[in-house]
């Protein structure tokens, strides 16, 4: 069953086409990694999934609901899709706990107590229970990104979107974030991840999508992608990021 | 040239001539600040909405207000009200409404810069949680915009406090008017205006120092 389905999505900035006829799907419980050179449109693609970026053509369907259709309650739909950003985007004026409870209270209408309980549990899970009363600026990048994952999970999402979650991190902090993501994947969370972490892709991805110049060039099972990518562009890309 | 004599300046004079004027100047400043920031924020949101039917009227309003002298708007509004409604509004009320509407234009530009100082990613993060546009603005963007712009907002308020002296044009009784009246009563106008300058200086300079400290504090938090 498809959790996320993209059909012929195209997007333009003025006359420049950033996405060209992109189609793919992520089934329930699947982990799909999207990679490609910078400027290839992968971040734009993943932001089209929950319509943070509008697209002009095509259709995105999440759990049977069309994102771009006129009658769709976008906030309600987005609340069920967790998203983690490259630059964390925690709310700097709120404490860590408030970051975790805001959406639960304002969107899901949970009671403050219920939201806090959930927040504590999730902070424990990402190993940051002691930091609840601190503010985002007082945490390291890796810690902030783990909080961001917890914030998304607090909404009990149907699926999770990751937009280069480790590319703004110092090298020594990448693994603490990847560990949390691997754990999530092994628990069966449906995940779409824009990432260059090929180790992560090897470990948990079912499929790998390779994008270049706004096109999905390759969309293959992990074994095929790492074994023998069919396109020359994907081969070049892999040789660049794997051998150094 | 006679020697300066400020011996007429005592507690009795303060309570008789100055206190009421001082209270009105402060009231006018505070009300115009609160109302100006509120209306200014709405104007800023209209201008940033990306909808022409909201953005254009807001821009026209702000640009008009910023292009005319305040004292002219004060007089104009004071004369216009009786013309439209048939009865005068009184100098004090007229001043409060005029200052609020006028300052809204300036506060609006500050809030617009403040909103734009918050990264686009914060809007995305709010939206991704399922917050509506209004919730994202109210809970995420505006608190940060306000905090980032606090020193500038306060600086504008200091200017506003100085500008309240312009209500002399419509005869409202403010702090400066108090000094002027006292000076006339004791036949010491030069001394009265010197004292007035000293009082305005002390108030504005201490507020500026507060702003400086705030700026340093905010710089650390960010």
Image: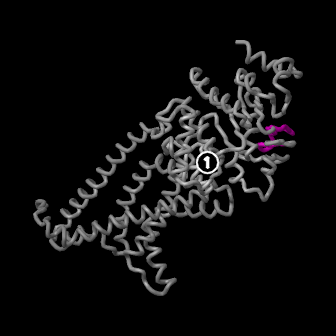
- Residue neighbourhood size for the residue with mark 1, other residues' Cα within 10 Å, grouped as few (<14), some (14–19), many (≥20): many
Q: Which region is colored magenta?
A: A9-26
**What is the chain identity of the residue bearing mark 1?**
B
Residue under the point 54% across and 31% down: A127
Within the image, what quadrant is residue A209 found in? top right
The image position of residue B168, as x and y in percent, is: 34, 70
Residue B95 is a magenta residue: no
Within the image, what quadrant is residue A89 found in? top right
Quadrant of the image for the C terminus of chain A? top right
The image position of residue B1, as x and y in percent, is: 13, 61
The answer to which of A181 and A241 lies nearer the viewer is: A181
Looking at the image, residue B53 lies above or below residue A33: below
Q: Is residue A203 visible?
A: yes
- Name the residue that disc number 1 marks: B126
Q: Is residue B117 visible?
A: no
What SS does tag 1 mark?
helix
Residue under the point 23% across and 67% down: B179
Looking at the image, residue B81 lies above or below residue A61: below
The answer to which of A150 and A94 lies nearer the viewer is: A150
In the image, farthest residue toward the right: A230
């Amino acid at each position: 069953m498809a959790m996320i389905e993209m059909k012929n999505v195209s997007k333009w900035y003025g006359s420049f086409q950033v996405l060209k006829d992109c189609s793919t799907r992520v089934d329930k419980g699947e982990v799909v990694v999207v990679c490609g050179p910078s400027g290839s449109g992968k971040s734009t693609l993943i932001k089209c999934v929950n319509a943070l970026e509008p697209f002009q053509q095509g259709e995105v369907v999440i759990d049977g609901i069309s994102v771009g259709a006129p009658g769709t309650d976008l906030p309600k739909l987005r609340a069920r899709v967790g998203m983690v950003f490259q630059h964390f985007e925690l709310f700097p004026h709120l404490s860590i706990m408030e970051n975790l409870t805001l959406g639960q209270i304002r969107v899901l209408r949970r009671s403050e107590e219920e939201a806090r309980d959930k927040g504590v549990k999730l902070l424990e899970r990402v190993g940051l229970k002691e930091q609840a009363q601190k503010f985002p600026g007082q945490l390291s990048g890796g810690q902030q990104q783990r909080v961001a994952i917890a914030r998304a999970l607090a909404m009990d999402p149907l699926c999770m979107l990751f937009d280069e979650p480790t590319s703004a991190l110092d090298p020594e902090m990448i693994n603490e974030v990847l560990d949390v993501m691997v754990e999530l994947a092994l628990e069966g969370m449906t995940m779409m991840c824009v990432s260059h972490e090929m180790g992560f892709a090897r470990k948990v991805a079912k499929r790998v999508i390779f994008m270049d110049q706004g096109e999905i060039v390759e969309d293959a099972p992990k074994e095929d992608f790492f074994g023998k990518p069919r396109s020359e562009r994907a081969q070049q890309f892999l040789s660049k990021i794997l051998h150094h | 040239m006679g020697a300066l004599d400020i011996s007429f300046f005592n507690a009795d004079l303060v309570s008789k001539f100055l206190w009421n004027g001082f209270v009105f100047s402060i009231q006018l400043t505070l009300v115009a600040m609160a109302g100006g920031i509120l209306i200014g924020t709405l104007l800023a949101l209209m201008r940033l909405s990306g909808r022409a039917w909201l953005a254009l009227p807001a821009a026209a309003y702000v640009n008009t207000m910023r292009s005319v002298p305040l004292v002219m708007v004060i007089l104009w509004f004071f004369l216009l009200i009786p013309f439209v409604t048939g009865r005068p509004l009184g100098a004090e009320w007229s001043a409060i409404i005029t200052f609020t509407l006028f300052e809204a234009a300036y506060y609006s530009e500050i809030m617009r810069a403040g909103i734009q100082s918050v990264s686009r990613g914060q809007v995305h993060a709010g939206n991704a949680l399922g917050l509506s546009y209004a919730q994202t603005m109210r809970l995420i963007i505006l608190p940060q915009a306000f905090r980032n712009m606090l020193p500038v907002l306060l600086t504008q308020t200091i200017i506003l406090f100085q500008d309240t002296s312009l209500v002399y044009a419509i005869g409202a009784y403010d702090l400066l008017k108090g000094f002027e009246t006292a000076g006339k009563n004791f036949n010491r106008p030069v001394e009265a205006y010197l004292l007035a300058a000293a009082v305005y200086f002390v108030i504005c300079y201490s507020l500026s120092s507060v702003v400086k400290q705030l700026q340093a504090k905010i710089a650390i938090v960010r």
